[in-house]
Amino acid sequence: MAVWVGALGFPALVFIVGALLRLYRRAPQKCATDVFGLFVVFDAIVAGDPDPFLRFINSDAGPHDLFWAVFLLGFIATVVWVFCILDLEQKVVRAHTSYPISRRQFPFRPWITVWSVCTALIVTHFVLFTGRVAI
């Protein structure tokens, strides 16, 4: 039963929370924000059972060390995910609805902020699981 909660329950919870936050802010769905949601799910699954993932890390780290590493990454991904849904998505929507016919202004700062943090999380996970840095 615990496997089903981790495999289906938590991803469904993240999906529902994201949908409720978007309904609250009347925000559309954005690709980069959903990548953060995937990191939240992945980090929670790894933190829930770190033993199978230890073989991907070239380090003498134990399950406890991996748990805290992905817990920290998951916390950062959760904060960024909620911030993107509640704040940055609104700025992008406002920029697109302000100039519906001619795009005189591109919402560069919100756009580059979301994708920069997304890229940083991807690189951090890649570095962790390819053994480029020890825990």
Image (tube, rainbow, N blue to C red):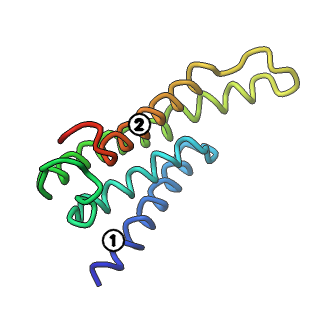
Quick one: label 1, few (<14), some, or many (20+) residues within 10 Å? Answer: some
Q: Which of disc 1 and disc 2 is earlier in sequence?
A: 1
Q: Quadrant of the C terminus?
A: top left
Q: Amino acid under label 2?
A: Val
Residue 79 location (% of width, % of height): 35, 39
Asked whether 130 or 75 is in front, the reply is 130
Q: Nearer the viewer, mark 2 or mark 1?
A: 2
Task: Kindly give the residue lying farthest to the bottom in the view shown.
Answer: 1
Asked whether 18 or 115 is in front, the reply is 115
Residue marked by disc 2: 123
Residue 125 location (% of width, % of height): 36, 44
Please name the residue shown 34% across and 39% down the image: 127
CA gap, disc 2 to disc 1? 25 Å
Please name the residue shown 45% across and 45% down the image: 36
Q: Quadrant of residue 112?
A: top right
SS class of the residue under badge 2? helix
Q: Quadrant of residue 9?
A: bottom left
Residue 68 location (% of width, % of height): 17, 48
Asked whether 123 or 57 is in front, the reply is 57
Q: Are marks 2 and 1 in contact (CB under 8 Å)?
A: no
Quick one: label 2, few (<14), some, or many (20+) residues within 10 Å? Answer: few
SS class of the residue under badge 1? helix
Please name the residue shown 60% across and 45% down the image: 31
Q: Could you say which disc has been placed on residue 6 in the image?
A: 1
* 56 shown above or below 102: below
Q: Quadrant of the N terminus?
A: bottom left
Please name the residue shown 75% across and 23% down the image: 98
Q: Amino acid under label 1?
A: Gly
